[in-house]
Amino acid sequence: MKSEIDALNLNSKANPQTLYCIGVGPGDPELLTLKAINLLRSVNCLAVPQVEPNQPGLAQQIVESLLPAGTTTPKLLPLLFPMTRDADVRETHHRKAAEDIIDMLDAGQSVAMVTIGDPTIYSTCFYVKHKVEDKGFAVEVVPGITSITAAASKAGIALSEQKESIQIIPGVSTFDDIKVALVDPRVQTLVVMKAGKIIHDLRDLMSTTELVNEAVVVSRLGFADEVIKSVETTTDEEKWPYFTTVIIKKKN
């Protein structure tokens, strides 16, 4: 008798007129799920976010090594998402990206929009997903390994044990939110994502406490220039990428 695993479909194929929001993990291509790889190799169109025109983003860099060399399938569809805090500008680019994807779906194509980490955590995918669904097209979200769990694994940190709680804050949040979380006794582990611009501020904030010894900064996870170090040892001269994660595990 076949087991439940044997009965599963382990060779997913993309359906026409369907958008797949695929998480491609933090950087190491080997951390992609089998489902993600199967879909990426079977879709007609690969939608790749870019911060600057004609400059491949991290998600595109991660998946390129998994696609057959010299192939013209899937077709690349660049989506421009500039780094800005202007809500109107962001909405304009979200709408344009959705329209470009809808054009492909209207033509009967299947589309995979890739995003680093997991699509459900601070991802542009969902802004596009809602607009595509509003036009009546099917959308499937394919989970990926988050930078949070990958960074904790590399640093040898248990994010949560027994009844410990975790709080996740984006680095673009107000610094007061981070200050509150650092002293909140209900939060045993604090994760600050997209923390590149505030590493030095975090270090200085924690410098008079034991927390500075417990804080770990992880950047470029899975890439050749990966960095994992104590926040305490960071210097003012160091420049940190936008996608940098800080994990602060408080001592009980």
Image (cartoon, rainbow, N blue to C red):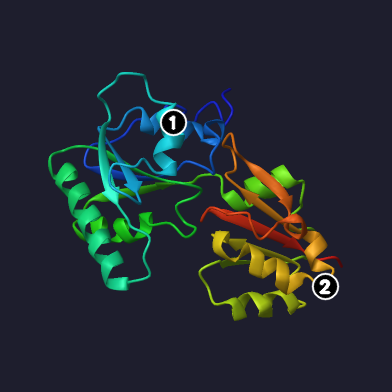
Quadrant showing the C terminus: bottom right
Work out whether residue 159 can be spotted.
Answer: no
The number of numbered discs placed on residues in the rendered structure image is: 2
Q: Position of residue 35 (x, y in %)?
A: 45, 34
* Residue at image coords 54%, 44%: 26
Q: Where is residue 128 in the image (x, y as percent from the top left)?
A: 30, 57
User: Which amino acid does the dot numbered 2 rest on?
Assistant: Thr
Left or right relative to 76: residue 120: right
User: Which amino acid does the dot numbered 1 rest on?
Assistant: Ile
Work out whether residue 107 can be spotted.
Answer: yes
Depth check: give the residue in front, 95 or 61.
Answer: 61
Q: Position of residue 127 (x, y in %)?
A: 33, 61
Distance in Å between CA atoms under marks 1 and 2: 44 Å
Quadrant showing the N terminus: top right
* Residue at image coords 27%, 60%: 94
Q: In this view, does 8 lie above or below 198?
A: above
- Asked if the residue under mark 2 is in contact with the one under mark 1, i.e. CB atoms within 8 Å, the reply is no
Q: Which quarter of the figure has residue 98?
A: bottom left
Q: Which quarter of the figure has residue 142?
A: top left
Depth check: give the residue in front, 171 or 186.
Answer: 171
Q: Which of marks 1 and 2 is in front?
A: 2
Depth check: give the residue in front, 24 or 228.
Answer: 228
Q: Is residue 76 above or below residue 86?
A: above
Q: Position of residue 71 (x, y in %)?
A: 29, 20
Mark 2 sits on what residue? 209
Few, some or many residues within 10 Å of mark 1 (<14, 14–19, 20+): some
- Helix or strand or loop: what does disc 2 sit on? loop
Residue 64 - label: none
Mark 1 sits on what residue? 37
Left or right relative to 234: residue 56: left
* Residue at image coords 47%, 60%: 122
